[in-house]
Image (cartoon, rainbow, N blue to C red):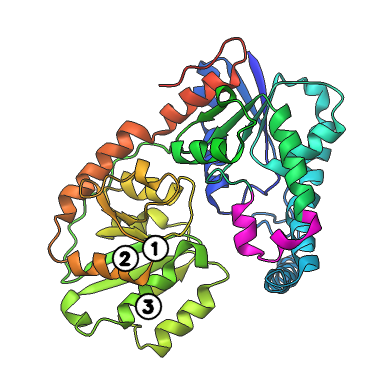
Amino acid sequence: MVKVALIHHIYGFHKNGANTVINTLLNAKSLFLEKGIDIYDLRPNGACRDPKNKSIPTGIKTIHNLLVDNVNHFLTSCAQYSRFAAMAIMYTREHHLAKKTLRKFFSQKESNFDVLFFHSFFTCYHYLKERSTKEPIVLVLHSNGDTFKMSRIYYKALEKSIYYKRILKKEKKVLNIVDRIVFVSEASRTNFLNLHPYISPDKVFCVYNGIEVTSPMLELKEREYCEVVCVASITVRKGQHYIIDALSTIDNLDDLKVHFTFVGDGPDRKRLEDMVSSKQLDKYCSFVGVTNEVVKYLENSDIYILPSEDEGLPMAIIEAMRSGLPIVSTPVGGIPEMIEDGYNGLLIQPSIEGVKDFLNKINSTDWKTMGNNARKVFEDKFTVKKMVNDYAKILTFSHSPQLD
């Protein structure tokens, strides 16, 4: 039996794409055991921000969370123009948590893991600095192939700092040492190899994300309008602002009979809610925040939309396809590997005009057939069983993996 330590520095209760993948892998422990792999969860222990942590009084948790949110918001704002702020937030969000995670790992070192399965660059970096043994290392990078692109988007001053140049040096060392590198799309893998020509393609792989197969609820939707849902963190990168801007430019909006529901939260939510109000679009847009009933919103919708500017392989699109929804998204990252334009959805540009192109087709497209095709694509490519099978081959070092 191969003992594998899955290591990530983000708390498991955080709702993001990487954590969704990790939680799915850990919940598939029985499938891994069938492949001769015993997988262990080595992430940070719960903290004040953990909504399930009942050992801390609610009042203290609330005050703590507000303080952390305000500090993070302040640092994120400053990181747009301050190199020091960009360095500070990168340290607190990456290095600090990575070191905390490694304390947990080294405290369990007597477990003698056979393979280390990292899902974050900085945790892997700090491990390599402190390790005394040399277990095989698999590093999964949940990116579009450019390791720090999202950091550069969120903290614009970072790229101009000396600190960022040091990070790039660390990146080169880590990538040369680890045994296997995994991306969640072929586009990400190709982009990575183009950006890192010193890395052998033989140790870089693609494994598509996957989720459990469930039967979609086939409810009769009796309404006179088209319900479009966007499940995603509400940030500039995800492109929700293009939807609102596009709606505000259409004169005959009532003729379209469309409504958008935004599920999720993020730094751009308040600004977008204010935009909807100021442009008098409340009739056409609703914000529901973070919810445990995402599937309910998906299955009560007709179309899923994600006008992102940058992606790896969005878990939200996979969840929408499982629910039998046609997908409207952009040709970035691995999304073209998920959507065949005109078959299981539409590919649009991440822009106001791109969203308007979709709206112009909304009443003349066979969305039902596209939704059925989306479900077929999900069953063929994006199930948890297929994901586990592919990772099992990579985590077994007795042979060279040959993925389907």
What's drawn in magenta, residue-wise?
148-163
Amino acid on which disc 1 is placed? Pro
Image side of residue 301 versus residue 369, left or right = right
Where residue 27 appears, as percent x and y from the top left, is 53, 34
Amino acid on which disc 3 is placed? Asp
Answer with mark 3 or mark 1, whichever residue precedes in sequence.
3
Residue for badge 1: 350
CB atoms of marks 1 and 2 within 8 Å: yes
Amino acid on which disc 2 is placed? Gly
In this view, the residue in front, 150 or 286, is 150
Where residue 230 appears, as percent x and y from the top left, is 38, 62
Q: Residue at x 48, y 51 (%)?
A: 311
Query: Which marked residue is nearer to the observer: mark 3 or mark 2?
Result: 2
Q: Quadrant of the C terminus?
A: top left
Gap in Å between the C-alphas at discs 3 and 1? 12 Å
Image side of residue 256 versus residue 16, left or right = left
Gap in Å between the C-alphas at discs 1 and 2? 6 Å
In this view, the residue in front, 142 or 316, is 142
Answer with mark 3 or mark 2, whichever residue precedes in sequence.
3
Provide the secondary structure element on which disc 2 rests: helix
Residue for badge 3: 245
Q: Residue at x 39, y 47 (%)?
A: 335
Q: Give the quarter of the image for residue 376.
A: top left
